[in-house]
């Protein structure tokens, strides 16, 4: 038990060190400015991270009084949607950072004196500590989304990470056949998984085929070159209505060059588009239209999870596509190491038992599924994480993880979701086909 708690406290500190690293290279203007109405000013995230930790560690576990009740109002994401946060009287950089630091110091002192009580579902196996660490990690990814939309901040990148593995030459259109039959979807894990991942339950699926690799820029570029954004027959009614409201002719960040090639702009820097990398920053509507262009469809999240966690002779699911061992740099592109997606074929060691690759890391992958509770779902520990978003027709589920996702969040049962029209998320595509 002592070793578990020590490891969790290290995770808290590692996440905070990453937060400091991310904002430390930014000036005050970049931290305080709202770059886009769909994203928060980064200084709001700093205060919110501190407030969330205060609520769950100091108050819920320790019974502490609030630092300032006004912070609960300023940093409540449901009372303050993203587009109004730039107008709030937020704590400035120094005050927000000091608040988060004070909360952390008190939390570490409190946790040093608390046991991971198995009778308390918040403390059992350190659940609430993991939740706070995952929460900060998820906001780090959201902050990167905001920075990617930021004009005029100059080239932004953290210290160089280890190089990604060398990609092997592959057929980026290869498909894997997944047999039909029942399997167990979801998890019963109560140590780290969120409530929407539980409980594990039996699902019956017909056989299907699925891309071995995420859809590449090369494949998506053909859709662009052949007028996919202007071909009404490729778009659903909702997708075409969205397309008529925007001027998009390519994924977010793609820049046409005079010679007919493409460059990509990320975080203020620009480079030639790598055709072997997974396409990134596409909306669900774009993914749906591309699927129709290639004669396929988006997989359901059940199909995605079966391809990721099961295998032809499996008796139980794997925690990760490659097995139960935690992510390593040779298995997945995570934690901002590669500063973007890696070419397909880079991670054969991360393949699932079926042989499907790069399911975790690089890009989140859109599915056809609406965000719904699993049979037997129970809210824990608060409804605002999952319950309030269920069954909204504008949301679709994304699976996997991106290159910016923390390993503490990147598991095969993790369910992300976003509006169908959004593309600031590090979102990509993997297609499926019915067996005929």
Image (cartoon, rainbow, N blue to C red):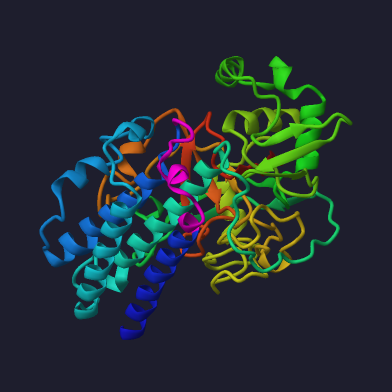
Residue 122 visible somewhere in the drawing: yes
Q: Nearer the viewer, residue 287 or 158?
A: 158
Task: Please report the bounds of the magenta region as a residue range.
Answer: 22-37
Q: In this view, does 214 lie to the left or right of 53?
A: right
Q: Magenta segment: does it hold 140?
A: no
Q: Residue at x 56, y 55 (%)?
A: 404
Residue 339 image position (x, y, % from top left): 64, 56
How many discs appear?
0
Q: Is residue 196 left or right of residue 271?
A: left
The residue most toward the bottom is: 2
Q: In this view, does 15 lie to the left or right of 405?
A: left
Q: Which residue is drawn at 51% across and 38% down?
A: 369
In the figure, 344 relative to 246: above or below?
Answer: below
Q: Which of 99 and 18 is in front in this view?
A: 99
Please identify the quadrant where the N terminus is shown. Answer: bottom left
Residue 185 visible somewhere in the drawing: no
Please identify the quadrant where the C terminus is shown. Answer: top right
Q: Which of 236 and 30 is in front in this view?
A: 30
Q: In this view, does 38 lie to the left or right of 208?
A: left
Q: Which of 244 and 82 is in front in this view?
A: 82
Residue 199 image position (x, y, % from top left): 37, 56
């Amino acid at each position: 038990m002592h070793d578990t708690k020590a490891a969790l406290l290290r995770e808290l500190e590692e996440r905070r060190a990453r937060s400091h690293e991310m904002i430390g290279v930014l000036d005050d203007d970049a931290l305080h400015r709202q770059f886009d109405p769909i994203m928060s000013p980064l200084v709001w995230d700093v205060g919110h991270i501190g407030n969330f930790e205060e609520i769950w560690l100091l108050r819920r576990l320790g019974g502490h009084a609030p630092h300032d009740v006004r912070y609960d109002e300023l940093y409540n994401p449901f009372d303050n949607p993203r587009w109004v946060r730039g107008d709030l009287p937020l704590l400035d950089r120094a005050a927000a950072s000091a608040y988060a630091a004070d909360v952390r110091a008190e939390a570490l002192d409190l946790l040093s004196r608390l046991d991971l009580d198995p009778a308390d579902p918040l403390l059992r196996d350190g659940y609430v500590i993991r939740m706070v660490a995952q929460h900060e990690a998820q906001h780090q990814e959201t902050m990167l989304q905001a920075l990617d939309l930021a004009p005029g901040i100059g080239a932004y990148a953290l210290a160089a990470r280890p190089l990604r593995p060398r990609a092997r030459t592959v057929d980026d259109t290869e498909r894997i056949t997944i047999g039909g039959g029942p399997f167990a979807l979801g998890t019963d894990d109560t140590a780290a998984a969120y409530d929407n991942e539980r409980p594990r339950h039996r699902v019956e699926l017909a056989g299907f085929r699925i891309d071995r690799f995420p859809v590449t820029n090369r494949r998506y570029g053909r859709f662009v070159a052949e007028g996919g954004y202007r071909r009404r027959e490729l778009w659903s009614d909702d997708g075409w209505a969205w397309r008529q409201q925007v001027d998009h002719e390519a994924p977010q960040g793609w820049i046409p060059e005079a010679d007919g090639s493409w460059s990509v702009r990320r975080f203020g820097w620009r480079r030639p588009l790598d055709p072997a990398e997974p396409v990134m920053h596409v909306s669900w509507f774009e993914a749906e239209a591309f699927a129709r262009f290639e004669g396929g469809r988006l997989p359901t999240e059940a199909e995605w999870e079966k391809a990721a966690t099961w295998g032809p002779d499996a008796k139980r699911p794997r925690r990760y596509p490659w097995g139960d061992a935690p992510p390593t740099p040779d298995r997945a592109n995570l934690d901002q190491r590669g500063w973007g997606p890696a070419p397909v074929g880079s991670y054969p060691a991360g393949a699932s038992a079926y042989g499907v690759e790069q399911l975790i890391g690089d890009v989140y992958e859109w599915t056809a599924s609406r965000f719904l509770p699993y049979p037997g779902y129970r809210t824990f520990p608060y409804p605002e994480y999952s319950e309030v978003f269920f069954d909204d027709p504008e949301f679709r589920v994304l699976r996997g993880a991106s290159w910016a996702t923390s390993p503490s969040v990147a598991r095969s049962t993790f369910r992300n979701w976003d509006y169908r029209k959004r593309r600031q998320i590090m979102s990509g595509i993997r297609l499926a086909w019915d067996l005929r």
